[in-house]
Image (cartoon, rainbow, N blue to C red):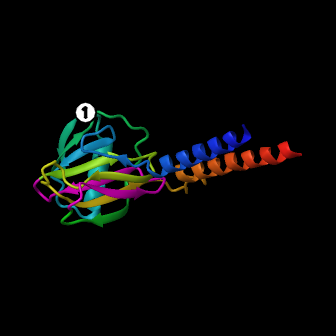
Amino acid sequence: MKRKFLGSALVLGCSMFAAAICNVQALTIGDANELGFVANGIPSGANDVTAYVNQLIEMSPGTTTTALGQTFTRSTHIFSPLDPAVLVSRVTYGGLIEPTVTIHLETGFEYLLAKYDGPNFGTEVWYVGGLSGDITIPSHAENNDQFGLSGTSLFTELAVPPSAVPDSATTALLLGSAIMILGLASRKLAKC
């Protein structure tokens, strides 16, 4: 019976660890994390993309407006609070073949902007507050390999460092280890 418990504890701990490692969130254009869309998002310099995200933040859900030489469409999704966007990092892409691009999010990012195919498609902005770890976004705006991803930008407003809460993979590993140690301790105590 005790061996079954230890075996079950190890299986449970390892399963939770594997699930945490494989937990990749996929963002898609128009999904529940969409803050809004900018048609077409050019120019796309650092100050421009920051202004685009801040324009979407200021808009009421479900509205469309023309500003900054662009057409902005705010999704109907409500996110709160929406802090002002501060640009943190940018990545440029070109000639992607894979269907998705993986981005590693540190805790504290609030917005992810993805620019698709220069003037031919537009700019998607997602609210990623509360997400961390690996996420994927489409490498092309349409399934037929049109409108390739040309760049991404991450934004945050959090000035306070995130608390020292372990990520889900670390938590699963610690839990599995604790269960295994409890199983071994109970086995030792049973022999006494």
3 up-or-down from 51: above or below? above
Residue at 25 percent across and 59 percent down: it is 48
Q: In the image, 166: left or right of 70?
A: right
- 51 within the magenta span: no
Q: Report which quarter residue 77 is drawn in.
A: top left
Image quadrant occupied by the N terminus: top right
Q: Nearer the viewer, residue 54 or 123?
A: 123
Q: Residue furthest right?
A: 192
Residue 145 visible? The answer is: yes
Q: Position of residue 95 (x, y in %)?
A: 18, 65
Residue at 58 percent across and 45 percent down: it is 11
Residue at 36 percent across and 64 percent down: it is 89
Q: In the image, 112: left or right of 9?
A: left
Q: Nearer the viewer, residue 21 or 189?
A: 189
Q: Position of residue 110 (x, y in %)?
A: 41, 50
Q: In the image, 9: left or right of 52?
A: right
Residue 165 visible? The answer is: no
Element type at mark 1:
loop
Q: Position of residue 147 (x, y in %)?
A: 14, 55
Residue at 22 percent across and 35 percent down: it is 63
3 up-or-down from 105: above or below? above
Q: Which residues are magenta?
A: 97-120
64 up-or-down from 174: above or below? above
The amino acid type, in three-letter code, at marker 1 is Gly
Label 1 belongs to which residue? 62
Q: Position of residue 146 (x, y in %)?
A: 12, 54
Q: Nearer the viewer, residue 82 or 110?
A: 110
